[in-house]
Every structure is written in structure tokens, then in C-alpha cells.
């Protein structure tokens, strides 16, 4: 395995980390609006992700920059093609971050309720659009022999498969967020989320099954690895469902982790050895080798990642351990988001 | 290529969103260590005044930081969305410092900010104080990697041209990370942040001292802001000069434009203070200048020769073929001067303010306090004009002497820009108002007068308000 393949895997790992961590933040952002009986309960749910959501989002930045640094041609073809979805994504990222941070800066139900709605809508759009984005990559876009996006359409990422990818990630985020809240909150909010986690898992499991099947039959080369990863995604979602029905959210939480890793892996396996299929002419698709940066540059990046990633995982895990306690309504009122 | 409308719209979007992002960066860079210092002082001395100041400036820091971080994310997306030819061209070199920022700085900032904000009751006091320091290190490291990337565009080093693709390929990361341009530009940026934060703290203190409220806290803030501001501005004069010498060496056209110097001059080149510039005729209609000063500033020697824009234009045509290689001199000349004026006026006023308030005096004059408060905007203008100068006066290049700005844009339909520009203007405009009102509200409210204890400590007695 050469450095380009290694970085293809690192990109997959970074995006898996993003969906696993920020996935529950998206879910919590939506659930706080729909399950919170009052302003205090909504604050309780947002406080549960308060210390970590910002760092979770850095997995996205790093996942995007890894594409830029390790595969400049991939980044350059992909981002203009995804102009409209990415524009909505950055607007949602800005709105959501500011809303979470500013809602607690003033008392009063009107101010807070408005920001809570903004958090929910932005979270919904993000969870959906990142699914569309990645399934859209697997489907391919119109790029020409120079590796440039030649479409003039704003909708080149929209097709039935990519929308299914978006709905899969959206429902997954809801199930994952509810599971997280079942683990991290106490009181009525915990009880509500325990019940809703299982319900969302039914929907997410069904969509995940449909997406895995479609990916396997239409986009993969039909080999055993692709089949195994697809089955893993489905089985992991089923385990999560059973665990949530039995009120065992910790098992469900890690089962979601396995499912989302398999979800990302299934798409990367379907792509390999390409990184971006051309819908105009399969022979000009961008490949892992063709899109990769130079060996020297990839070596520098590998050293940075070898030092940086273990450190990041270590101190982020420590931060989760520091905030391991369940959050009550009273805790939330006393916190930075109080 | 050369779709002028597309290029202009893409530049407009990138310039406005970058300047907007830079509204938040300097204050974070300067205020983070200030709050960290306050937390440390409270931890070591236990004095309540430090706790209240840390709470107060900490909440202002967080409001500011929230906007700074997301507007920075927008910029990283825009490289690909709007400047994909640039991204493809520079990715092999430019990606490395960006990846370092993400993995080594960005994670650090956000994780330890979370720990500091929410960990007050969960962490031992020393560890909690360490978190705000690590956050500060993260913000400073983040700025460093971004300046390294920008400096590479100003002065490409540590690369070779790939004979097959014609793109630069990284071959010496050390040269990219430690080139003098990057190191001086970084010092310049950080000092700009420290000046901005000192003037901010100074003006906030002025607001409360004028009203004779929160006196013990605000006197401390006032004094430390003056000390920090004068030291940082003094350092900035030295660093700015050193950077100027490097720029004269590697980007002579930038200095020629910044000084509206059309014909080569020297020894004893004179520095224009005011000029009426005729870009078409490539000359100044009128100018007021100080003899010899330009040679001293640009080359560190009275005998130094400074090359003019006309000679440089001829050299460029010889190297790269016909074309206009002269930036907009009017913008370069005046943004350069406004950067210096707005950058230093705050510290100059601080000297006056220090004199007027020595030995604990609090002047009565309304004008004194009005200036001390309204001066808060000047470092922001200084920082803005600094970026306008450095980015405008390197045109027409986006990567110096290598890639023209007009050749770097994504080949997308201008329609995309007609959608995204209004979206950014509306979103950023609305949030600028929310942010400003929120900061104002917190500034006016002043330090907390709650009795809420910090981690592991009994509630302190409420100190009497000095009326």
C-alpha cells in the first residue's frame, strides 16, 4: 500500500470520525427543538453537547483539508461542482454555531426559542446534505479530461441515490443523537430519548439497509469485501435497535459507531480506485493515484497526522471523560449555557 | 479563461468574507492571553478582582471567538468552491500548512475552549487554568499556519516545478515554515492582535471609569491595557519596519506601489506623505515628501536605492510578456498609510491617557473619555487596511510571479456568484449586527456582581461598589 492509498483511508477515517461525533450533535440539535418540553429542557439537551460539539466539528475541517492537501485534484474538481450544497452547508454551519453559542447570552423565551429553531433547521440541513454530498461523489459528477467540473448546473449533486444517502445520514443522526441524550441526560429528557432512540433506529436501520444494498449492487464491483461491509452496516444498525429497545444506550451508541464506519467504508470501497467518477466518460474519472499530491508532500502530511491524530484522539477522549456525568436541568442552568 | 465578471465577483466575495473574518481574529489573538493571565492571577492570589475581570473579558472573548471560528471555516471551503484552479495549482504546497492548522491547532483550540467553558466545576483549578492557556496556544498556532500559507503565496519557497503538470511541488517544508517573510508577517499579525485587544480593553475600561463604576477592576484593566498597548505598538514599529525590508527585497512592486514610487530613486529616496496619483499616466500629479526617509525605511540605509514601478513593469514584461503588472497604486499608497495611522493612534493616545490618569486621577473632561471610548475602532481599521494593502498591492498575482489572480478562479457560472454573494451579505450583515449588539450589551453590563464562587472556593464577600 502506497501513501496515496494510506491517505485515501485517512480521509475515510476523518469523515467517519466526523459523522460518529458530529452525528449526535446534529441529532441533539434537532431533538432539542422537538423533544424539549420547555426552554429549560432544550437548554439541558444542548448543554449535553456543549463542551464537545465544537471540537467534533473540527473533524469536518480536517476531513475537508485532508482532501485538499493529499488530493488537490479531487478537491479542485469536487468543491465547485458541489457549490450549491456547500453554500447551504456553510450558511448552516455559521448559523448553527452562532445560535448554540448566543442563545444563552440573553434570558427570555423569545430570544432563546428563535435560536433553538435555528439550531434545529441548521442541524437538519447539515445531516442531510453531508449524506447527499458523499453519495453524490459515489454517483459521480460531470468532469472532463482536464479533471475540471464542466457542469453549469447547481443540481449536479441531486439524484435519487444521493437523496437516499442524505435521508440515511439524517435518520442516523436522529437515532444517534437520541441515544447520546439517553446516555448523557437525567430526568424526563432521558426517558423521552430512550423511547425515541429505538423509533429512530427503525427508520435509520431501514434506510441504511436500502442504501447499503443500492451501493453494493449499483456502485461496487460486487466483491466480498464490499458485501461484508454492507452487511456490517445493516447488522450494526439492528444491534443498535435491539439495544435501544432494551434501554442499553451505551451498546447502541457503539453499534452506531460500527454502522457509520461501515457506511463510510462502503462508499470508499465503491469508489476505489477512483476518488471521483466522471459521469461524462468513465476513462477520465479521477483516481487515487492520479489525484494524489507528490510523495514528499504526502510524507510531510503523514508525519503530521502520525503526531497529531493520536494526540487529538487522546485529549478529545479525555474531554469526554471529564464530562462523563449525566446532565440534569439544574446542571444546565448553572453551566456556561445557563 | 479571463471571464472578467466571474473574476471580479469571485474576488469581491473572497475579499469581503476575508475582511469580515478578520474582524474577529485580532481580538481573539490578543484577548485570549489576557484572559489566561487573569485566570492565572486569580488562581495564584485568590483576589476577587481578577475573578470578576476574567469572567467579564472571558465572556467577551467567547462571543467574539464563536464568529471568528465559523467565518474561518467559510474561507477554507471557498478555496475549493471559488478558487479551484488556484487550489489545484498550489495544493501540493499550500495544503500542508492548512493540514497542520487543522490537526495541530484547530482541534486544540476547540477542545480546550470546551474544557475551559464547561470544566470550571469538573477540573482541579490548575488544570482549568492550563486549559485557557492551551486554548491560547491553539489560537496563536492557528494564526501561524495560516500566515505561513499566505506568505507562501506572497513569496513561494521550498518547491520545484513539476515538469509534467507545470504545478509547484513541495520539496522543503522547513523553508515554507520558517522563511523570514512568514516569521516577520506572523510577528506583525500577532502584535496587531495585541494592539487591538489592548485598545479594546482600554476603551471598555474608559466606559466604566467615566461613569465611576467597577473602579477597582477597571483601573487594573486600564493600567494593564496601556502597558500592553504601548509595548505592542512599540514592537510593531520595529517588526513592521523589518517586514518592510523583507518585502522590498522579495516584492519590490508592492513597495513601489505602496510608496507611489514610479521612477527608481536613490540613494536618499524620499518618502511621499501625501500624493495625487495618476495611474494612467504612471506618475504623481503632486506629492509632499520627506527626503531620504524611504531609503532608510525600505533598505535600512540612507544610500539604498528603491526601484520604481515603471522599471519593475518593464522587467515584468520582459519576463512574462506583455500585460499590466502594476497594482492599483492609489489603493496601495493610501491603505498603507491608513494602516500605520490607525494602527498607532491608539497607543499614542494611551500615552496621553496614562499621563492624565497618573497617580490614580480620573479626569472630568467629557472629551477625554469620549476619545478614550471611540478610539476602540481604530485598531480594526488599521488591521483591515493592512490586509487591503498586502493583498491588493501584490496583484495581479495570486501566487507571486507564478499564478495570475484572473487565471485562478473556478470555471463556474457567474450565476453561482449571484446567488452566493447576496447570501453572504445578508447573513454576515445580520450577524454583524447581532454580534455588535451582544458585545455592547455585555460591555455595558460590566463585570459580574454575582456571588457565584469559582471551582472549589467559598463564595467571596461582595465588595462594596465605589460610587
Image (cartoon, coloured by chain):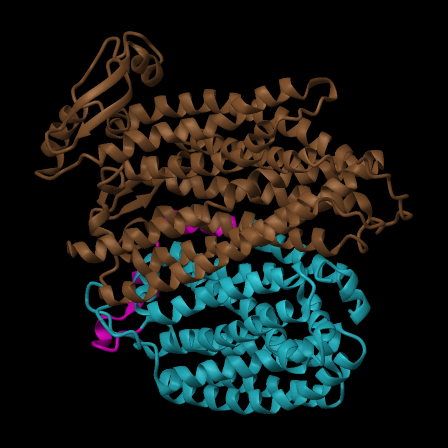
Chain colours: A cyan, B brown
Is residue A296 located in the magenta-colored stretch of the structure? yes
Q: Nearer the viewer, residue A5 or A238?
A: A238
Residue B307 seen in this snapshot: no
Q: Tell me if A255 is positioned left or right of B166 in this view.
A: right
Q: Which of A54 and B168 is in front in this view?
A: A54
Give the quadrant of the N terminus of chain A: bottom left
> For the image shown, how many numbered marks are present on the structure?
0
> At which x and y percent is residue B35?
68, 40
The secondary structure that most of the magenta stretch takes on is helix
Q: Tell me if B461 is positioned left or right of B196 in this view.
A: right
Q: Tell me if B296 is positioned left or right of B137 in this view.
A: left
Q: In which quarter of the image is residue A273?
A: bottom left
Image height of A42 relative to B286, above or below: below
Is residue B347 located in the magenta-colored stretch of the structure? no
**Stretch in magenta:** A277-305
Image height of A165 relative to A39, above or below: below
> At which x and y percent is residue B375?
52, 33
> At which x and y percent is residue B232?
55, 26
Report the residue at 23% width, 45% height from top: B403
Q: Tell me if A315 is positioned left or right of B383 in this view.
A: right
Give the quadrant of the C terminus of chain A: bottom right
Image height of A247 relative to B353, above or below: below
Report the residue at 55% width, 83% height from top: A171
Amino acid at each position: 500500500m502506497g501513501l496515496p492509498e494510506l491517505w485515501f483511508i485517512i480521509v475515510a477515517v476523518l469523515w467517519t470520525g466526523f459523522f460518529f461525533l458530529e452525528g449526535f450533535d446534529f441529532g441533539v440539535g434537532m431533538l432539542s427543538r422537538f423533544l424539549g418540553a420547555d426552554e429549560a429542557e432544550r437548554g439541558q439537551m444542548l448543554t449535553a453537547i456543549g463542551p464537545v460539539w465544537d471540537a467534533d466539528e473540527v473533524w469536518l475541517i480536517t476531513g475537508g483539508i485532508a482532501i485538499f492537501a493529499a488530493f488537490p485534484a479531487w478537491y479542485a474538481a469536487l468543491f465547485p461542482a458541489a457549490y450549491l450544497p456547500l453554500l447551504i452547508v456553510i450558511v448552516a454551519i455559521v448559523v448553527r454555531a452562532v445560535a448554540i453559542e448566543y442563545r444563552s447570552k440573553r434570558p427570555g423565551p423569545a430570544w432563546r426559542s428563535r435560536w433553538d429553531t435555528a439550531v434545529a433547521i441548521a442541524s437538519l440541513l447539515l445531516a442531510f446534505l453531508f449524506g447527499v454530498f458523499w453519495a453524490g461523489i459515489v454517483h459521480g459528477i460531470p468532469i472532463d479530461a482536464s479533471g475540471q467540473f464542466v457542469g453549469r448546473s447547481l443540481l449536479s449533486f441531486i439524484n435519487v441515490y444521493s437523496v437516499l444517502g442524505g435521508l440515511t445520514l439524517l435518520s442516523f443522526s436522529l437515532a444517534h443523537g437520541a441515544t447520546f441524550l439517553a446516555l448523557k441526560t437525567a430526568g424526563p429528557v432521558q426517558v423521552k430519548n430512550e423511547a425515541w432512540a429505538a423509533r429512530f433506529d427503525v427508520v435509520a436501520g431501514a434506510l441504511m439497509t436500502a442504501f447499503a444494498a443500492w451501493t453494493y449492487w449499483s456502485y461496487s464491483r460486487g466483491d466480498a469485501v464490499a458485501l461484508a461491509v454492507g452487511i456490517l452496516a445493516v447488522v450494526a444498525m439492528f444491534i443498535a435497535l435491539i439495544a435501544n429497545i432494551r434501554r442499553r444506550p451505551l451498546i447502541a451508541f457503539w453499534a452506531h459507531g460500527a454502522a457509520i464506519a461501515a457506511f463510510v467504508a462502503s462508499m470508499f470501497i465503491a469508489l476505489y480506485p477512483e476518488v471521483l467518477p466522471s459521469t461524462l466518460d468513465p476513462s477520465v474519472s479521477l483516481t487515487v493515484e492520479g489525484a494524489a499530491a507528490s510523495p514528499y508532500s504526502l510524507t510531510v502530511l503523514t508525519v503530521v497526522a502520525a503526531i497529531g491524530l493520536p494526540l487529538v484522539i487522546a485529549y478529545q477522549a479525555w474531554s469526554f471523560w471529564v464530562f462523563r456525568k449525566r446532565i440534569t436541568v439544574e446542571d444546565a442552568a448553572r453551566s456556561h449555557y445557563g | 479563461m479571463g471571464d472578467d465578471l466571474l473574476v471580479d465577483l469571485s474576488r469581491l466575495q473572497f475579499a469581503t468574507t476575508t475582511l469580515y473574518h478578520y474582524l474577529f481574529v485580532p481580538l481573539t489573538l490578543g484577548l485570549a492571553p489576557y484572559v489566561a493571565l487573569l485566570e492565572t492571577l486569580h488562581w495564584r492570589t485568590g483576589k476577587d478582582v481578577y475573578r470578576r475581570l476574567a469572567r467579564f473579558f472571558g465572556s467577551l472573548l467567547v462571543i467574539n471567538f464563536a464568529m471568528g471560528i465559523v467565518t474561518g471555516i467559510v474561507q477554507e471551503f471557498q478555496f475549493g468552491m471559488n478558487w479551484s484552479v488556484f487550489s489545484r495549482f498550489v495544493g501540493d504546497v499550500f495544503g500542508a500548512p492548512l493540514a497542520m492548522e487543522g490537526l495541530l491547532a484547530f482541534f486544540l483550540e476547540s477542545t480546550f475552549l470546551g474544557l475551559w467553558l464547561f470544566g470550571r466545576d469538573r477540573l482541579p483549578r490548575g488544570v482549568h487554568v492550563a486549559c485557557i492557556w492551551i486554548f491560547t496556544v491553539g489560537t496563536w498556532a492557528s494564526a501561524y499556519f495560516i500566515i505561513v500559507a499566505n506568505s507562501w503565496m506572497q513569496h513561494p519557497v521550498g518547491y520545484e516545478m513539476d515538469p509534467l503538470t507545470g504545478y509547484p511541488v513541495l520539496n522543503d517544508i522547513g523553508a515554507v515554515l520558517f522563511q523570514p517573510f512568514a516569521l516577520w508577517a506572523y510577528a506583525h499579525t500577532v502584535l496587531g492582535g495585541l494592539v487591538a485587544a489592548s485598545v479594546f480593553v482600554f476603551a471598555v475600561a474608559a466606559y466604566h471609569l467615566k461613569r465611576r463604576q467597577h473602579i477597582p477592576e477597571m483601573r487594573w484593566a486600564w493600567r494593564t491595557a496601556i502597558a500592553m498597548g504601548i509595548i505592542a505598538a512599540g514592537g510593531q514599529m520595529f517588526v513592521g519596519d523589518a517586514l518592510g525590508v523583507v518585502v522590498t527585497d522579495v516584492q519590490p512592486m508592492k513597495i513601489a506601489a505602496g510608496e507611489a514610487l514610479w521612477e527608481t530613486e536613490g540613494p536618499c529616496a524620499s518618502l511621499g506623505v501625501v500624493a495625487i496619483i495618476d495611474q494612467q499616466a504612471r506618475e504623481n500629479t503632486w506629492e509632499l515628501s520627506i527626503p531620504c526617509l524611504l531609503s532608510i525605511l525600505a533598505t535600512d540605509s540612507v544610500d539604498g536605492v528603491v526601484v520604481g514601478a515603471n522599471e519593475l513593469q518593464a522587467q515584468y514584461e520582459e519576463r512574462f510578456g506583455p500585460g499590466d503588472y502594476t497594482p492599483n497604486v492609489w489603493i496601495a499608497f493610501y491603505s498603507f498609510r491608513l494602516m500605520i495611522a490607525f494602527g498607532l493612534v491608539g497607543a499614542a493616545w494611551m500615552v496621553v491617557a496614562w499621563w492624565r490618569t497618573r497617580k490614580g486621577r480620573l479626569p472630568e473632561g467629557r472629551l477625554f473619555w469620549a476619545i478614550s471610548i471611540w478610539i476602540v475602532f481604530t485598531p480594526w481599521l488599521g488591521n483591515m487596511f493592512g490586509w487591503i494593502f498586502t493583498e491588493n498591492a501584490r496583484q495581479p498575482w495570486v501566487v507571486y510571479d507564478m499564478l495570475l489572480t484572473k487565471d485562478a478562479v473556478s470555471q463556474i457560472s457567474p450565476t453561482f456568484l449571484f446567488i452566493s454573494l447576496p447570501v453572504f451579505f445578508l447573513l454576515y450583515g445580520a450577524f454583524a449586527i447581532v454580534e455588535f449588539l451582544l458585545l455592547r450589551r455585555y460591555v455595558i453590563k460590566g463585570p459580574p456582581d454575582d456571588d457565584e464562587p469559582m471551582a472549589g472556593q467559598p463564595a467571596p464577600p461582595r465588595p462594596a461598589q465605589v460610587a
